[in-house]
Amino acid sequence: MDQSETNNMIQTLIRNPAYGPFYGIMGVSAAMVLSSFGAAYGTAVSGTGIAATAVMRPELIMKSIIPIVMAGIIAIYGLVVAVLISGTLNSALTYPVAKGYVHLAAGLSVGMCGLASGYAIGIIGDVGVRNTALQPRLFIGMILILIFAEVLGLYGMIVAIYLYTKDIN
C-alpha cells in the first residue's frame, strides 16, 4: 500500500467514522418501535371500548372496528420509514455520520408522531365507540375526530420522508 492509498483511507475514515451507521440503525429502531407502541396502545384502548359496546349492542361490533384499523395504520407508517432507512445502511466506510443523524431524526419524527397519534386514537376510539352505542348520530363525528388523530402520524411520516430524501454527505 503506497502513501496516497493510505492517505485516502485515512480521509475516508475521518469523513465516515465507524459509528456512523449506529445512528441510522437507531432511526430504524425508533421508527418501528415507537410507532408500534402507539398502534398497540390505540388498539388496546379502543378494544376495551369495543368489548363494552358489544355487551350492550352486539350489532355495532363491525362498525366499531374502525379505530383499531386506524391504529394499525400508524405502525405501517413506521414500517415504511424503517424500510427506507434500512435500505441505505451499508458499509461504515460509505455511510457518513451526518446521514446517520438525519436518519435518526427521521425515525424519531415518525415514531414520536405515531406514538402521539396512537394515544389519541385509543382515547377517541374508546370513548367514541361507547357513546356511539348510546347515540348513533355520534358516529360521523367520531370518524372525523379519528381522522384528525390519524393525520398526526401521517405528518410525522411526511417529515421523515422529507428528511430521508435530503442529500447529506
Image (spheres, grey):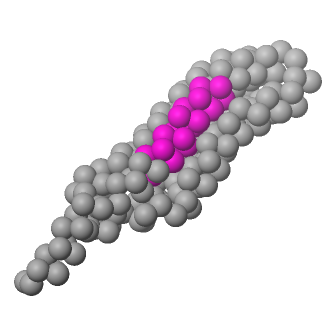
In this orientation, which residue lies closer to the viewer: 19 or 8? Answer: 8
Q: Which residues are magenta?
A: 103-121
Residue 33 in the figure: left or right of residue 138: left
Magenta span contains residue 76: no
Q: Position of residue 22 (x, y in %)?
A: 30, 50
The percent coordinates of residue 70 (x first, y second) are: 67, 40
| Residue farthest to the bottom, as pictured | 2
Q: Visible in this render: residue 167?
A: yes
Magenta span dominant secondary structure: helix
Can residue 63 be seen here? The reply is no
Q: Residue 85 appears at what percent x and percent y?
A: 45, 58
Q: In terms of image quadrants, where is residue 39?
A: top right
**Image label count:** 0
Residue drawn at (52%, 54%), measured in percent from left and top? 81
Q: Please name the residue shown 72% across and 17% down the image.
A: 127
Is residue 111 found inside the magenta-colored segment of the image? Answer: yes
Residue placed most toward the observer, 69 or 145: 145
Q: Is residue 125 left or right of residue 119?
A: right
Q: In this picture, is 22 found above or below 40?
A: below
Q: Where, quadrant-wise, is the C terminus in this rendering?
A: bottom left
Toward the viewer: 166 or 135?
Answer: 166
Figure quadrant of the N terminus: bottom left
Residue farthest toward the left in the current orientation of the protein: 1
Residue 66 in the image, given as x and y percentages of width and height: 72, 37
Residue at 92% x, 24% y: name it: 137
